[in-house]
Image (cartoon, rainbow, N blue to C red):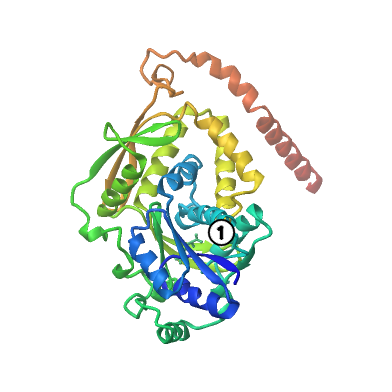
Amino acid sequence: MGKVVLAYSGGLDTSVAIKWLNEKYGYDVVTLTLNVGQNEDLKLIEEKAYKIGAIKHYSIDALEEFVNEYINNAIKANALYQGKYPLSSALSRPLIAKYLVMIAELENAEAVAHGCTGKGNDQVRFETTIKSLNPKLKIIAPVREWNLTRNEEIEYAKNKGIPVSATKSKPYSIDQNIWGRSIEGGVLEDPYFEPPEDAFEWTKPLSEAPDNPAIIEIGFINGIPFELNGEEMKEVELIKFLNQYGGMHGVGRIDHMEDRVVGIKSREVYECPAATILIEAHKDLEKFVLTKHENEVKEYLDSLWTKLAYYGLWEDPLRKDIQAFIDSTQIPRVTGKVKVKIFKGNLRVIGRKSDYALYDVKLSTYGSESLFNQKDSEGFINIFSLQTVLAKKVEKLNARREEHKKV
Ligand code: ARG
């Protein structure tokens, strides 16, 4: 029997896939689960995999790596797809794919498998990464292939003795990790229908958020958060804290009309308190320390980086080229502190400081003691406005000519 390594979440789709890969393809199934901060009991997932028929299970704690190599790059790139989605699910896929390939090579498996449907982005992200890391591996996408409805799937699971927990009481498709929680499906498929409270787990509704605002001070070093309210903190803990604290204040709920790679428009709902706060603070600090020329180019390259990550082109040289530019802007200058006020779902930067600030109060002050020589502006404006003034003059001249012709 050949072997297949399956990315196993413990959910219904991938549980059914263990049996299906075994029966339909005759594969021995090796399962792999990564901890990316999804807050699930990895031990239970492992037990479930063995119970359904996996011959071997790998449980890998990849949380630190996810934060250091993926989330930090997203913070440095201010990554918000279409201005809104912090890429929480998207960022985890190339990491899971990397480990799938590693374990497949270790186990001498001929194939890898994932539980994505044929309609989403995740299949694209997994397979693009797998193909680029090891083009010889066969890729199987059972859910895309088997064409079962949800009910048929549940029926199949029951027949095969696979424990089923997904029922009508859990109407959403959820994917979560330390960077956010994605909620899709069910009533959310009506884009005009307000997401009901039962869709949310990490964030409080505005009516239940505290009646007083809170102020958080975030310290960044080389573009990466390392300090909270003056205290150094392990980044994993810092992110967890902001998810909890921001969520309590109703910060980080996102309702997004999203364009998928495969062209489908979909209504996506997210809860990403830490990502929302950290990206907003980081963006502000950059404006404080980088030149306007850098900020202009960075805004464009950030959005390109974000698109590449969303599209699953993590391994593409262009992503790494842009990464090099971004890193060069961060080290050492994007270092300093940002003060953020959160209140009833709202988030506002209310202060920033940095040793690398290009801001100079001696230049910008409206007080009399300014270093800025206002007389310089006169000549500057003459040159700066030159072409606009010329164009306007020519426009008027020609308008007058037209008038003359008419008379
Ligand atoms: N639309 C998001 C993305 O493509 C989230 C997908 C998450 N998957 C889920 N089963 N809810 O990154």
- Where is 91 relative to 256, above or below? above
Residue 173 visible to the viewer: no
Q: Quadrant for the N terminus, please.
A: bottom right
Secondary structure beneath label 1: loop
Q: Quadrant of residue 280?
A: top left
Residue 147 is left or right of residue 45, and the answer is right
Q: Position of residue 111 (x, y in %)?
A: 61, 65
Q: Residue furthest left?
A: 211
Q: Residue, x 49% and y 77% (percent of image)?
A: 19
For label 1, count other residues whose C-alpha is less than 10 Å away and answer few (under 14), some (14-19) or many (20+): some
Q: Residue, x 56% and y 37% (percent of image)?
A: 298
Choose between 144 and 326: the one closer to the eye: 144
Q: Position of residue 263 (x, y in %)?
A: 61, 66
Q: Residue furthest right?
A: 405
- Where is 142 relative to 203, above or below? below
- Where is 215 relative to 12, above or below? above
Q: Residue, x 57% and y 39% (percent of image)?
A: 323
Residue marked by disc 1: 107
Amino acid type for the residue under numbered disc 1: Glu
Residue 154 is left or right of residue 298, and the answer is left
Q: Position of residue 142 (x, y in %)?
A: 56, 74
Choose between 79 and 365: the one closer to the eye: 79
Q: Position of residue 251 (x, y in %)?
A: 32, 52
Choose between 209 and 401: the one closer to the eye: 209
Residue 250 is left or right of residue 260, and the answer is left
Residue 342 visible to the viewer: yes
- Where is 295 relative to 109, above or below? above
